[in-house]
Image (cartoon, rainbow, N blue to C red):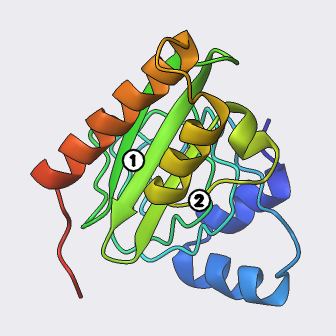
Amino acid sequence: MANQEHLAKLREGARAWNQWQEENPTVKADLSGADLGGANLTRANLTGADLGGANLTRANLGGANLTRADLTEADLSEAYLGENHVLQVGPGGSRRDYTVAKWGPNLDEVEAGYWTVSGHMGTLAEFEKRIAEVYGEPDNPHGIYYRGVIALIQAARVAYPGKKE
């Protein structure tokens, strides 16, 4: 459930939100489950924010910083992401969790199951390396699943690369 103070500050607009973020750099924004459908979040600094399960349908996230933001089970239907892209796959893997890939001109992150819970979200290359280390056997069902997810992310990145700044 979203922290109501955080939600109220975000609803004041990106300028007020970003100022609050600068003044409170150690606070992890909790916007989990929030109804932000249709919200104008243009250029909002959502770095590290918990947006898990949030309703972001038709929200404007153009220019928003989504680095390390948790978008697990967030509804991004018809949301405007600018040059950023988000792909969510699942549930699957050993924890029956979602894998979320985010990429764009200044964004390259993958989060999935235990890897995210243990604080190890990272780039697609790091994720691919970790999957090979943990699920190296060719017939491991979780490894097969995650290698398929990696292939899907790679294909999506080719189709929707995002523009370089």
Residue at 65% from the left image edge and 54% from the top image edge = 121
Quarter occupied by the N terminus: top right
Which residue is more in the foreground, 131 or 110? Answer: 131
Farthest residue, direction front = 137
Q: Mark 2 or mark 1: which comes first in sequence?
A: 1
Residue at 63% from the left image edge and 69% from the top image edge = 47
Residue 26: percent from left, percent from top: 88, 76
SS for callout 2? loop
Residue 74: percent from left, percent from top: 53, 35
Q: Quadrant of residue 67?
A: bottom right
Q: Amino acid at mark 1?
A: Gly
Residue 58: percent from left, percent from top: 33, 44
Count neighbours of disc 1 (C-alpha within 10 A) and say few if under 14, some if 14 to 19, many if 20 or more.
some
Quarter occupied by the C terminus: bottom left
**Marks 2 and 1, how far apart at CA:** 29 Å
Tag count:
2
Q: Amino acid at mark 2?
A: Gly
Count neighbours of disc 2 (C-alpha within 10 A) and say few if under 14, some if 14 to 19, many if 20 or more.
some
Residue at 45% from the left image edge and 41% from the top image edge = 37
Farthest residue, direction left = 159
Which residue is more in the foreground, 41 or 125? Answer: 125
Q: Is residue 41 visible?
A: no
Q: Is residue 141 above or below residue 130?
A: above
Q: Which residue is mark 1?
A: 38
Which residue is more in the foreground, 103 or 31? Answer: 103
Q: Nearer the viewer, mark 2 or mark 1?
A: 2
Q: Which residue is mark 2?
A: 122
Residue at 39% from the left image edge and 77% from the top image edge = 106
Residue 23: percent from left, percent from top: 82, 89
SS for callout 1? loop
Residue 33 as seen in the image, left or right of residue 142: right
Q: Is residue 81 above or below residue 14?
A: above
